Image: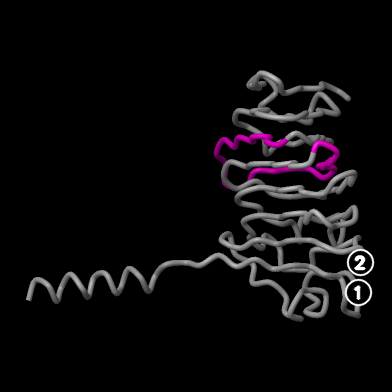
Amino acid sequence: MRHFKLATTLTLLCCTLAFATEYTWDGEGAGGKQWTNDLMWAGDAKPTMSADNTLVFDGTSYIITTNTFPMHSDIGWIKIAPTAAPFLFARQSSSLGDRLDVFSGFEHNAANVVSNLMATDVWGDWMVNVSDPAGELHQVGVMLTEDNVAHAISKFGPGKYQLFGNNAGLTGTVTVADGTLVVRSVTSLGAAVSDVIVSNGATLDMYG
């Protein structure tokens, strides 16, 4: 009897596990640059938005993309593939209704490519990895916090990450572990401006 109860418990736990899915934008379809367009994604199926899932952007077609999912749709990671052209991630309008909630962070893996991230909302502590020394990622939109808690950001990889705008979502510690973090204005670090850690060999470039 005891053995039976244990087996039942294990079965229930297994059934509740969440599995992460990676979706790749290949830009090979027709009908426009919208994220909700099935044809723009590998396998012709748009992503299921979830904090467990990852969006990977690759290719050289339709590199100006627009988030057309409902407001505050969740995603875990956004990644730029090593073979990608420069991408621009735009919003539908100037309103906040289509902002993307990013839970884990960004990963830029392409060389000699500057990709631009528009407005995003911070949930949890972010990691930003610019893995190629010649790669560069720009946060040109505003980062806001939605859950009213402190948020930290950690920069990894030898490439460059540039912060623009008034990033009120950065309220925790900013750590530059590798490479270069460029802060373009006095408001780009938000409330974290006095709490920045720069590791040996890394660079903090204030105000560009």
Horizontal side of residue 194 vs 1, given as left or right: right
Residue 153 spot, x, y in % from top left? 64, 36
Q: Is residue 147 magenta?
A: yes
Write the residue at 71% across / 55% down. 78
The picture quadrant where one finds residue 5 is: bottom left
Determine whether the residue tagged by mark 2 lies in a helix, strand or loop: loop
Compared with 131, 199 (above or below) is above
Residue 142 spot, x, y in % from top left? 78, 43
Q: Is residue 163 visible?
A: no
Residue 102 spot, x, y in % from top left? 66, 52
Residue receiving disc 2: 62
The kind of residue on which mark 2 rests is Tyr
Q: Is residue 15 magenta?
A: no
Write the residue at 70% across / 42% down. 129
Query: From the image, which quarter does the N terminus lie in?
Result: bottom left
- Between the C-alphas of marks 2 and 1, the distance is 8 Å
Q: Which circle, 2 or 1, is nearer the viewer?
A: 2
Sequence-first disc among 2 and 1: 1
Q: Nearer the viewer, residue 74 or 3?
A: 3
Query: From the image, which quarter does the C terminus lie in?
Result: top right
Label 1 environment density (alpha carbons within 10 Å; few <14, some 14–19, many ≥20) = some
The kind of residue on which mark 1 rests is Gly
Point out the stretch of residues depicted in magenta.
133-157
Write the residue at 80% across / 53% down. 82
Q: Which mark is residue 32?
A: 1
Determine whether the residue tagged by mark 1 lies in a helix, strand or loop: loop
The picture quadrant where one finds residue 163 is: top right
Label 2 environment density (alpha carbons within 10 Å; few <14, some 14–19, many ≥20) = many
